[in-house]
Image: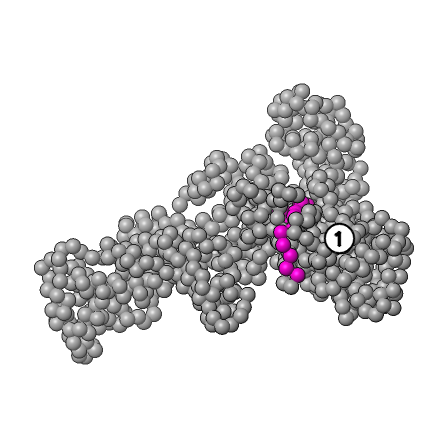
Amino acid sequence: MNIILTLTNEFKLQKWQVENVVSLIDDGNTIPFIARYRKEAHGTLDDQTLREISERLEYLRNLDKRREEVRSLIEAQEKLTDEISEALDKAVTVTEIDDIYRPFRPKRKTRASVAREKGLEPLAAAIYSQLPDSPSAVELAADYIDEEKGVETAEDAVQGAMDIIAEDISDNADIRRRLRNLFTVLGVVNVKAADAETESVYEQYYDFSQPVKLIAGHRVLAIDRGEREGFLKVSVTLDNVKSSNVINSATLSDSGSLCTETVREAGADAYDRLIYPSIEREIRSMLTENAALAAIKVFSSNLRELLLQPPVKGKVALGLDPGYRTGCKVAVVDATGRVLDTGVAYITHSAAQQEQAKTLIKNLIRRWGVQIIAIGNGTASKETEIFTANLLKEIDSNAAYMVVSEAGASVYSASKLAAEEFPQFDVSLRSAVSIARRLQDPLAELVKIDPKAIGVGQYQHDMPKKELDSALNGVVEDAVNNVGVDINTASPSLLTRVSGINSTVAKNIVAYREENGAFTSRAQIKKVPKLGAKAYEQCAGFMRIAESKNILDNTGVHPESYDAAKTLLELCGYSVKDAKGGLDLTDKVKELGEEKIAEKIGVGVPTMTDIIKELKQPGRDPRDELPPPMLRTDVMDMNDLKAGMELQGTVRNVIDFGAFVDIGVHQDGLVHISQITDKYIKHPSEILKVGQIVTVWVLGVDTKKGRISLTMKKPKDA
């Protein structure tokens, strides 16, 4: 296989783009580095596309490896023909290669292998040839009766021959391919209840069927889980006439042979006993794999938006980790995330304890000048939110609150990482600190948590671990490098996600700054133990050093382009020092000619454009350009909601069939995909993103089940 050509066609790119991307990957460059600092080499492809190319490249290389393995295995049996070799060359999936290898694969004992041991293979060949003047199968079988071999009658011999024919038909790669395609296009997924009397969350699937080509991924994942839990029975079926036609057209002769009916029976047996169970498993596996890939894609998209939520900078935050029996854990952190104070407030206990809780939190707000309050959305969150809203009315403060997802907070607080960071606090207080920091800087805090535990997907615990981990870790890496990292304040967890930095080097960076003080230049990074030239090349552009005398050290300009940046500034009549407060060189460069200037400074136009953007606002955080998070000072109850009511809310999760929106009543409301827009969309993510602030109208409220239905389509009378 010509992998470069295949990638070029699949991604609709130029050959030189793919060649350069493959070369850069093979040279050990990270995706964030390639995306940001090698734009001329690949034509400004984004990090997501580059990651997809990298994943596909790995698949195609593994495919080629498997192709050659199979070729060698068949050749070792001295059965490799030009036809088989050509079929292997044309195969574009592992399944196709395995189909070709199936007849040559060593088999455990089967009915066909037993028949072959009895010497019935020549009889099978004679029957299958269906010669026009051939005697019947039973007559042919008379010569194969051998009591010593266990063939006592002609019928025994015919049955053995049919077993051989059935296995050969089952091993036919073309028949399998055609049937697999038919199942994909015309197959039907049928679901029944394992016990119709048993109540479960899967009742909508107790009598359900849908074509394979139409069934939605979230339904596949739900059905799979229901089957695993013993509530559902699932099958994939195909019209028997169509399956018979495929086998008969490939195996039956129109010569009028007396053996043709025997071959027909063998074909039917091959399908029922060997082919159908195998292909049904393949189709189920394909549906699950495709559903998982789609779910991982949605999860990745949601995670990316969550990580890139704008931080609430420069504000003292109070984190509340709600709880009933053990109370609400409280933590105050300063604008840099440093813990200032902690405590426990019993806000759901007696009236006296509630008053004590109010006094405690009021004192903390006044003492430390708390400006924002983050409330975890777990157990007792509603009571904590009501308590906080009432408390804010009683004090002279501009503080506001936001309910924050605490998904993964307990995982982090009980981790070795949290114990190292806060050895003096118990697990629950660490959660309160994490909740406060999530509001201040979601990215810096969420990188400490296993991405699977962040909770912005669907069926994430059912996903293939390797693929999910790879996709989510890629998202985290891209997000961190897109924003950049302050090397003098970043935690080891954050530094580990920087291009080219592993956990050992991340710890060495922290140890170096603790021993030598803050980094004062990017060049100083080279002194960190075990951070070699390649790692420096990969990471330097993503490290920010606000304390450096060289303003370029606090930008996304890579050190390799410092000379180009200086020359650019000089051509526009400035020096590097002039850029400290930011310079907009856009108009000047256009006046002088972009391509001409880029050539003079020795870089391509894309790199020059990036340099101009960085010089305009040194130290910029791309998240600051997004709308700020929605803070509240009051709370509503579910009973306050009425149909047609207009509200503003924050999108918390986007899934296949809609999106969940926080409208300030503790229970998120669902905007079904049909209620997002009047135009047709394949997926809610085409319109909505996690963290997006949207206007919604209440469609209905089911207080008994705790469900809120919302619409984004403005009612006519609204």
Q: Label 1: which residue?
A: 402
Above-or-below relation of 208 to 648: below
Residue at image location 54% in from the left, 41% down from the top: 679
Residue 490 visible in rendering: no
Q: Amino acid at mark 1?
A: Met
Residue 699 x, y percent position in the rendering: 62, 51
Residue 416 percent coordinates (x, y): 71, 64
In the rendered view, does 177 fall on the left or right side of 439?
left
161 is within the stretch colored magenta: no
Give the residue at x 82% y 67%.
346
Q: Is residue 99 left or right of residue 193?
A: left
Left or right: 570, with 138 as reference point: right
Residue 273's image quarter?
bottom left
Q: Which residues are magenta?
A: 688-703
Q: Quadrant of the N terminus?
A: top left
Quadrant of the drawing holding the C terminus: top right
Provide the secondary structure element on which disc 1 rests: strand
Q: Residues within 10 Å of mark 1 (few under 14, many from 20)?
A: some
Instruction: In this rendered view, identify the residue nearer to me: 285 or 599.
Output: 285
